[in-house]
Amino acid sequence: MQLDPETIYRRRWWTLAVLCLSLVMVIVGNTVLNIALPTLVKELHATNTQLQWVVDAYGLAFAGLLLTSGALGDRFGRKYALNAGLLIFGITSTFAAFSSSASQVIAARAVMGLAASLVMPATLSILTSVFPPNERARAIAIWAGLSGAGAAIGPIASGWLLEHFWWGSVFLLNTPVVVTALVAGRFLVPNSRDAHPAPLDPVGAGLSILGLATLVYAIIEAPLHGWGSASSLVAFAGAAVVLLAFALWELHTPDPMLDLRFFKQRGFSAGAGGITLNFFAMFGMFFLLTQYLQLVLGYDPLEAGVRVLPFALTIMVAAPSSARVAERIGTRGVVATGQCALGSGMLLLSTCGVHTSYGRLVVALVVMAAGTGLTVAPCTASIMSSLPMRKAGVGSAVNDTTRELGGALGVAVLGSLVASEYTGKLRPALDALPAPLRAAARNSLGEALQVAARIGGSEGSRLADTARAAFTHGMHTALLVAAVVAFGASGLIARFMPAQVYVGGPPDVVTAGPAEAPAAEGLAAEGLAPDGLAAEALEP
């Protein structure tokens, strides 16, 4: 059954609901497992290295494949990419839920990252093709708000499931979402693709996958081996060489997967930079906050998840409002203000200590969430407005790649700062301990608290208090750095981002397939498409 543009237009908000549901599944899939890591140690006897790769395998595959997946969606159909990603995600989640070893979970997480790379760009590119320019910024703002909320939903859902069911239930959370999205999408989500697709760029795709995966791997491993270690330097150098080769190839091939000349547009480059720096600060903060709530303030996983709800709720309000605010004060003004708010929230959070009240923490979370909500949606709109609609999948992939790179870098850099400060402050308290216990306590706050429990008595209590104070000191330093990054981003945005972004993009005809192209062009010529809506001959 084909849908005419008028029907697509009438159903656009229902389409957005399905796209947002698919998006939240991807975000939750990336965060739901963090709280379950201690359980994996107990149930699957996972080592520290395996735990690290349970988390990182997802991000590595996701970031490495985003550009290629977005380009494939543009060429062969964005709904096809979305449905394929949903199916793979659901099947692999079920496999992971019943895995019997940590290695199986790691493999499943890598495949889930591949599936997510198909889903996330497709949601934003379909959104762009369905909504007319005068509503597109508002739709993108809702999309961005729910993506931020998904980051907080994961830990809460995971904590509740772990309290009531076995560890694998955190993966089965995805199953009903996949089924609902596929069934509803059958009727509500139209297909679209580049009406005049260029030849495939296999060399560019291969270089982008290798370069981005190597870069993310280097960022992930640098805190473990040391930023200046030989292995880290080799990894970063390898990523730089491959990405340089990718850039040179894309600049000289007649049909590039990603036309790097788009970065000459201030809206595109400023939007990408703003998202990168925002997610650097936000993901780094969440990495520290999770440990702070559980290991310093003593909340259990579910209690910790519930206590970050103000962040999610504030983003769900602030992000959709950002489009209206941008209409009044301009995109540049709202993004610069949002980055300042994010930095201010980081400064406030840096004043929280071992015995801080929850009230102060809530204020910090609300201020940071308001800043993030005001920043991410306009930056995304700025990226998407810089590209022709036929390249919506690639534009969406660039947006998602900047998120992933910024987040990975934030966790690595801020985590390294905390580890360095923590070790330095804790060293005097470890001198009297046996070497094995000293090494364990130095590794992390969690292991230090385990050592303190083994020692017991007043000596164990002193070690636990010292370790918590050392971690909190390191967190303060890291949050100050994150605040400086956020304030610096605000200055860069104020300097380089266009004052206002028009979220329309050049007019393109987007089709579901070669056979339908003439029909779509005929509708556009006859003026049957709603004002500003890209005419499409689409399938549900």
Image (cartoon, helix red, strand yellow):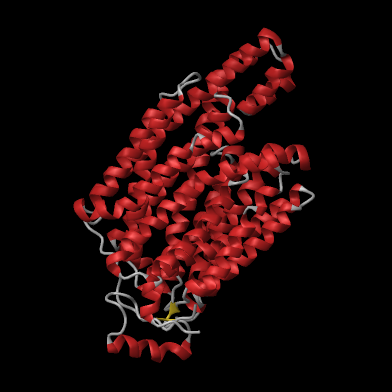
Residue 250 position within the rendered picture, expressed as x and y whole percent measured from the top left: 44, 70
Q: Identify the residue shown where x is 45% and y is 88%.
A: 516
Residue 293 position within the rendered picture, expressed as x and y whole percent measured from the top left: 54, 29
Residue 400 position within the rendered picture, expressed as x and y whole percent measured from the top left: 46, 57
**In the rendered view, does 397 fall on the left or right side of 86?**
left
Q: Is residue 28 above or below residue 134?
A: above
Which residue, as the protein is rendered here, is positioned at the far right? 100
Q: Is residue 509 above or below residue 339?
A: below
Q: Is residue 123 above or below residue 56?
A: below
Number of numbered discs: 0
- Closer to the camera in the image, 457 or 448: 457
Whether residue 203 is visible, yes or no, is no
Q: Identify the residue shown where x is 47% and y is 91%.
A: 515
**In the rendered view, does 14 fall on the left or right side of 340?**
right
**In the rendered view, does 538 fall on the left or right side of 437?**
left
- Closer to the camera in the image, 105 or 29: 29
Q: Is residue 8 above or below residue 349?
A: below
Whether residue 170 is visible, yes or no, is yes
**In the rendered view, does 450 fall on the left or right side of 65?**
right
- Closer to the camera in the image, 534 or 103: 534
Please tell me in which quadrant of the rendered image residue 259 appears: bottom left
Residue 48 position within the rendered picture, expressed as x and y whole percent measured from the top left: 70, 38
Q: Identify the residue shown where x is 29% and y is 74%.
A: 506
- Closer to the camera in the image, 252 or 352: 352
Q: Identify the residue shown where x is 44% and y is 27%.
A: 477
